[in-house]
Image: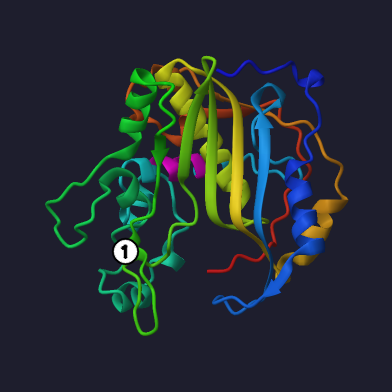
Amino acid sequence: MPNYLPFDERRVSTEYQDMLRTIRDTGVRVTTKQGVDALAIAGHSMRFPMAHGAAVITERSIKGFAPKAIGELCAFINGARTLDEFRAFGCDWWDAWASESKCLSRGLEPGDLGPGSYGHAFANFTTNLDDPDDRGFDQLPHLIKKLQDLPDDRTAVMSPWIPQANHREAGVKSRNTIAPCHGWIHAMVFNGKLHVVHNQRSGDTPIGVPSNMVQYNALGLMIEHLTGYELVEYVHWIQYAHIYVNQLEQVDEILTREPRRLPTLKLTEAGRRVTDVHDFRGEHFEVLDYEPHPAIRNIPVLT
């Protein structure tokens, strides 16, 4: 487990609010395929030294959803790409992205996100998208093994992006119902300590990004547990960071709230017994020392 400082010795984190304020105040207004304009900036990073707490926002409570978000990541790690597979991991919010109309328009069975979606790319990375017998390459176990064997190699990298599955041009639809927005991972060991950088292609910062923060901070804890290298920093980089204009009222409310200290994210006793990355589940993680502001339940979600 990271060497967390006692809660009252942790410094207050403004990283998430700083990002929202930057987008709100300086973002470029852009049109989107969702039909609602957004304010967007090109590139923003948030840094979370683990001594001062995990990347779990306090501006609104997400305690009830955090284990579900981690469960979704566990589904990706195990290759899930259909609604039924997601539900087996407790993920019941993918229906809008795997509707019959979206799937059929891409030549997919209803409920299938498609080849090159998160789970397929994480666990079955392949350039042959049409061969059901091609199991591809399982990226995360290789990343962990590389850190164990060659911690100074600088190439412990994972990508969710299979280019031809996400190819788009006039009159051509991708092979996925949604292009991967997150999941580029670079894990590095400096002087025997683990740093995990998560690179996100596109981030809906009021809704999706808080879930992604806790997901990939949890992935850092998985890597720490399986390699033995203490996780000392989680970095979250977003290339296309945006706020939809119909979310601005809620963002304004978030920005009035006083920043607070970040909580502890740790493995449970059952989680510490896991020896294979595929065996982690959302319930293997717990959030402690969490003192957030109240939840905000009416932030618009765009699909």
Give, as a three-letter code, the residue at label 1: Ala
91 vs 106, left or right, is right
Q: Is residue 5 magenta?
A: no
Q: Give the class, few, some or many, for how many residues have Cα within 10 Å of label 1's Cα (few <14, many ≥20).
A: many
Residue corresponding to mark 1:
165
- Image quarter of residue 293: top right
104 vs 38, left or right, is left
| Residue at the limit of the structure toward the left, as seen here | 133
Q: Nearer the viewer, residue 259 or 186?
A: 186
Identify the secondary structure beneath mark 1: helix
Location of residue 184 with respect to 289 vertically, above or below = below
Q: Position of residue 93 (x, y in %)?
A: 47, 57
52 vs 214, left or right, is right
Q: Residue at 67% across / 50% down in the picture?
A: 44
Location of residue 247 with respect to 4 vertically, above or below = below
Give the overall secondary structure of the magenta segment: helix
Q: Residue at 58% across / 47% down in the picture?
A: 211
Q: Position of residue 127 (x, y in %)?
A: 23, 56
Q: Nearer the viewer, residue 57 or 228?
A: 228
Give, as a single range, the part of the protein colored magenta: 69-74
Q: Nearer the viewer, residue 279 or 35?
A: 35
Residue 65 seen in render: no
